Amino acid sequence: MPDTIADLRTPAFDLTGLVGVVTGAGRGLGQGAAIALAGAGAEVVLVSRTQSDLDATKAEIERRGGAARTLLCDVTKADQVTRAIEGLERIDLLVNNAGGNIPEPFVNVTEEHLDYLLALNVKSAFLCGQSAARRMIAGGRGGAVVHMSSQMGHVGSPNRTVYCMTKHALEGLSKAMAAELAPHQIRSNCVGPTFVETPMTAPFFQNPTFRKFVDDRILLGRVGRIDDVMGAIVFLLSPAASLITGASLTVDGGWTSV
């Protein structure tokens, strides 16, 4: 039966009472994601391999009145992921954020760099998604996963062959997880930001040629900020997105629209 006008309610973006895990939570977009989840009411489990970064994010969340705890883990190591994430009593939300990039010409990519980025951007997402899904299934309450993809998960770009490959892989992983986990009411989606000014990207923007390359392709005329992405993450994890799974929300200023 369709809703009557009297039945309609604005969907909630509230995450109160839920436990969310954020990987790569010590810096950049991961730190922003953690602050966003806590601001929406979730208790946040901060995951990284650098304790000092985790402590700084935790302190900021608590300063804002939120709740957070830290979990030291190298997300490229299966034994550490299993022990850390599956060891949690409850997981409702996962932001699969840990990742990186080494821009360089395709013909110059070394096997070392290839293996490093495949492990950090793809293997870690698979391992964390798998462990979180196991806990969500065991909990029987459903759940939601957001994978930190990129506009480069939808297009190609010079000097980013490995990064583009890994982000396309992440988009595929998300869709496959959505298809398999739907019977458990676990949703899986991607967020695809454009270039965002973070500690990882700051050195790139010091190159005027690269800065112009980026500025010329973002239709809205500016690079992204971390808080441009925070709302998209909360939306996809929240009840407001309860019928959205297997999707990818680009936050790219129009880069992929032309």
Image: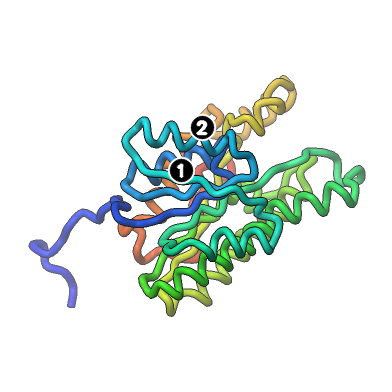
Disc 1 marks a residue whose amino acid type is Ala
- From what the image shows, is residue 51 above or below residue 21? above
- Circle 2 residue: 56
Is residue 254 something that shows in the picture?
no
- What residue lies at 59% left-to-right and 48% top-to-bottom? 72
- Circle 1 residue: 34
User: Residue 44: percent from the left, percent from the top?
Assistant: 43, 48
Q: Is residue 146 left or right of residue 215?
A: left
Disc 2 marks a residue whose amino acid type is Ala
- From what the image shows, is residue 61 above or below residue 97? above
Q: Quadrant of residue 165?
A: bottom right
- The one nearer the camera, 22 or 218, is 22
User: Residue 116: percent from the left, percent from the top?
Assistant: 79, 50
Q: Is residue 64 left or right of residue 108?
A: left
Q: Quadrant of residue 207?
A: top right
Circle nearer the viewer, 2 or 1: 2
Is residue 67 something that shows in the picture?
yes
User: Earlier along the polypeptide chain: callout 2 or callout 1?
Assistant: 1
Q: Quadrant of the C terminus?
A: top right
Alpha-carbon neighbours of circle 2 within 10 Å: few (<14), some, or many (≥20)? some
